[in-house]
Image: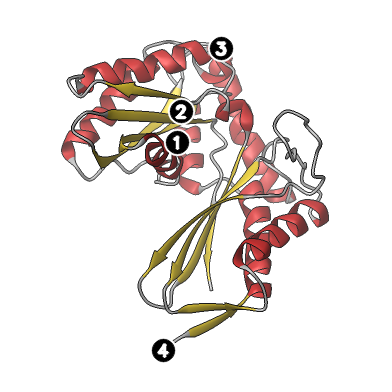
């Protein structure tokens, strides 16, 4: 049986989630930041981490953005094949919700209409929308605003099929070594491995949605995540570049089937303010 969902309800959900994601840090990220601040031996880095903790708690209490860069809105939508959207187009509804959240909610509008002519759209639209058709009449959204101080530090590489897990771990550490303090560490890394280049990029972004205290269900990749995290933290860049133990909070790796001749890898770098909020209709 077909289930009808109005475009208006989608816009309202998007508006609510945009504000929620920009105001409340996911609890798993907050807990790791608190743990890092308590265990950091470097005085300057510990002070920076304590400031990060104070900041996200104050933002939640005051209903203010966690960061001045309220990001480009990335939407992951699961739409059941038995869902019928009435009263408008899905994409238009999403962008209306983003517009209402950023204009009415007084969030910073950071999107330019063209990458070279750089004219601001003044309402933070359009969003980046990833849609997956699923079974049943489910309709769910994850809204993930992405700031570009960290997005700019992301990277891709087409490895040889003969390259090893250790080679990829070392490259991930090299990416963060080159980034230094620019992505506002401690960072979280989403890594897409396999597929095609575009599939790996989407997977890397989506990997950032996984709770930072949850490792890959495959022990092989769980060990790779731990190894890469260890190598990155051994760099000594530390919180906000002040040195110490905590350059990264987590490395989330998701793997895809790929071609016998290829091994694409994309790392999406996120700052400690790795924001997302989810909801259903």
Residue, disc 3: 242
Residue at x 56% of width, y 14% of height: 241
Residue at x 67% of width, y 78% of height: 87
Q: CA distance from mark 2 to mark 3?
A: 14 Å
Residue, disc 2: 36
Residue at x 49% of width, y 48% of height: 27
* Residue 214 screen position, x and y as percent: 32, 44
Residue, disc 4: 1
* Residue 10 screen position, x and y as percent: 62, 69
* Residue 178 screen position, x and y as percent: 49, 11
Residue, disc 1: 32
Give the side of residue 276 with respect to residue 225, left or right: right
Q: Are marks 2 and 4 in contact (CB under 8 Å)?
A: no
Q: Quadrant of the N terminus?
A: bottom left
Q: CA distance from mark 2 to mark 4?
A: 50 Å
When asked about the image quadrant of residue 263, the answer is top left
133 or 216, which lies in front? 133
108, above or below 19, in the image: above
172 or 231, which lies in front? 172
Q: Are marks 4 and 1 in contact (CB under 8 Å)?
A: no
31, above or below 138, in the image: above
Q: Earlier in the sequence, mark 2 or mark 3?
A: 2
Q: Are marks 1 and 2 in contact (CB under 8 Å)?
A: yes
SS for tag 2? helix
Q: Earlier in the sequence, mark 3 or mark 1?
A: 1
């Amino acid at each position: 049986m077909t289930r009808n969902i109005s475009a208006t309800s989608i816009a309202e959900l998007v508006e609510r989630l945009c504000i929620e994601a920009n105001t409340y840090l996911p609890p798993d990220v907050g807990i790791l930041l608190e743990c890092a601040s308590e265990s950091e031996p470097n005085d300057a880095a510990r002070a920076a981490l304590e400031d990060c903790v104070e900041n996200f708690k104050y933002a939640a209490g005051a209903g203010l953005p966690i960061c001045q860069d309220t990001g480009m809105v990335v939407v992951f939508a699961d739409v059941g094949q038995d869902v019928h959207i009435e009263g408008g187009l899905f994409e238009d509804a999403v962008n209306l919700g983003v517009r209402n959240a950023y204009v009415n909610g007084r969030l910073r509008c950071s999107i330019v209409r063209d990458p070279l002519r750089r004219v601001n759209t003044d309402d933070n639209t359009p969003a980046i929308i990833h849609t997956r058709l699923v079974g049943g009449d489910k309709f769910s959204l994850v809204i993930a605003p992405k700031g570009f101080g960290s997005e700019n530090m992301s990277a891709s590489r087409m490895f040889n099929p003969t390259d090893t897990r250790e080679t990829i771990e070392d490259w991930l550490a090299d990416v963060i070594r080159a980034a230094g303090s620019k992505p506002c560490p401690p960072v979280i890394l989403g890594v897409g491995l396999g597929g095609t280049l575009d599939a790996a990029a989407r997977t890397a972004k989506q990997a950032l949605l996984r709770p930072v205290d949850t490792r890959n269900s495959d022990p092989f990749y769980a060990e790779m995540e731990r190894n890469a995290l260890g190598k990155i933290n051994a760099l000594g860049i530390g919180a906000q570049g002040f040195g110490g133990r905590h350059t990264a909070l987590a490395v989330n790796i998701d793997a895809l089937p790929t071609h016998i001749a290829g091994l694409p890898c994309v790392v999406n770098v996120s700052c400690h303010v790795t924001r997302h909020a989810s909801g259903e209709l």
